[in-house]
Amino acid sequence: MTNTLNTKFNSIGNNALKNAETSIGIVEELTLQNSKDNLKVKGNSIYTLLGVKNGSGIISKVRGIEHLNEITIERKKIVNKLILPKAELNHLVEVEKTATPKTKTKKEKKETTAEKKQNIESDYAVKKADISLKNNAIRTTANNVVFPFIFLASQDSKNYQFKNNRVMINIAALDNKIVKAVFNVDKKNIQVEGRYFLACNLTLLIKLSKAVLFNVKIIDTTTSNETAEELENAVDEISKGDFDETKEKNIVSSIASMLDYLDKNKGFDGILQVENHIFSLEEYGQAKAELTNNVRKQTNNAKNYDLIGSVAVEFNHSKDFKVNTFDELETQFNKTFAIK
């Protein structure tokens, strides 16, 4: 008996592989047109957009970029001024928004009115969502093929070849550190005299391209941003919906692990900011204040306690240091109490 769920899930996986193979095909077509000097749109080529004379200047140009936002600008420029227009997908080109919106013509107003009338169609929203899904997939693919294409444009054509929806890369022409990081292969352990080709699918080709083109700062920033984005998505997901004890335990466990990580790596600035944030919590702070106020009321203020975590501390005076880093705390603390 056929497992329908299994078939459908495998279909999703197979489609993802097929899309990756199609992306390799796009990289191949871009590379072919570029080699024939046919990849130009309104005088723009991969070389003019990057500001280099030819492929030999690409790596030093891109590796000289130190900020991730500048890399993003270069990528968008190539997508919007070369790849999408060459594919006759001008409707997907991102255009910078003007300060004042353009006044609609009579024709545009009629089209807007007609579009509003379509809202009454039962499948209008679905059609619109389908178009958006398709367009997003195309733009995502265009973004994904940029750096593989740039990488191959920087290489001698003898050092790569397209074969069976893969790109064969001559690792003899690459630094051994990059080969180890991308392919998990040490050139010292194999015969790589002259040429030794290894296959790349889309994922490996993107990884290789970034390893060759990006400097260390960009790679570290990219990794940090990806980690931060994953963490942000996880926090956003766990913070949604109804609150319950299981969710509370999961949140506490995650926070405790993160604080342990900060502590082991001496991330005292981060811990201090968390500690300050805890003291600024409204509901929690009010609940603890009510506990200590009961003692003050019963003793006519003879006993003045504060709760630090689950420890009751008697005090008559406190000093609030408005700081966000441990160095600032140490400096102000020593200055206030004349520590030498």
Image (cartoon, rainbow, N blue to C red):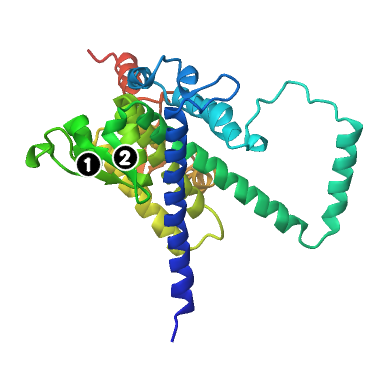
Residue 158: give x, y in percent of width and height: 27, 32
The structure residue drawn at horizontal position 37% and vertical position 48%, both measured from the top left corner, is: 255
Instruction: Using the image, tell me which numbered label, if any, was put on residue 161.
Output: 2
Q: Is 64 or 315 nearer to us in this picture?
A: 64
User: At label 2, which amino acid type do we have?
Assistant: Gln
The structure residue drawn at horizontal position 35% and vertical position 51%, both measured from the top left corner, is: 164
Res 339 → quadrant? top left
The structure residue drawn at horizontal position 38% and vertical position 45%, both measured from the top left corner, is: 202
Could you say whether the residue bearing mark 2 is in a helix, strand or loop?
A: strand
Position of residue 54 relative to residue 75, above or below, is: above
Give the left or right position of residue 339, taking residue 76 as reference.
left
Local packing at callout 1 (Cα closer than 10 Å; few below 14, some 14-19, many 20+) is: some
Q: Is 158 or 109 nearer to us in this picture?
A: 158
Res 120 → quadrant? bottom right
| Residue holding disc 1 | 197
Residue 230: give x, y in percent of width and height: 42, 45
The structure residue drawn at horizontal position 63% and vertical position 36%, both measured from the top left corner, is: 88
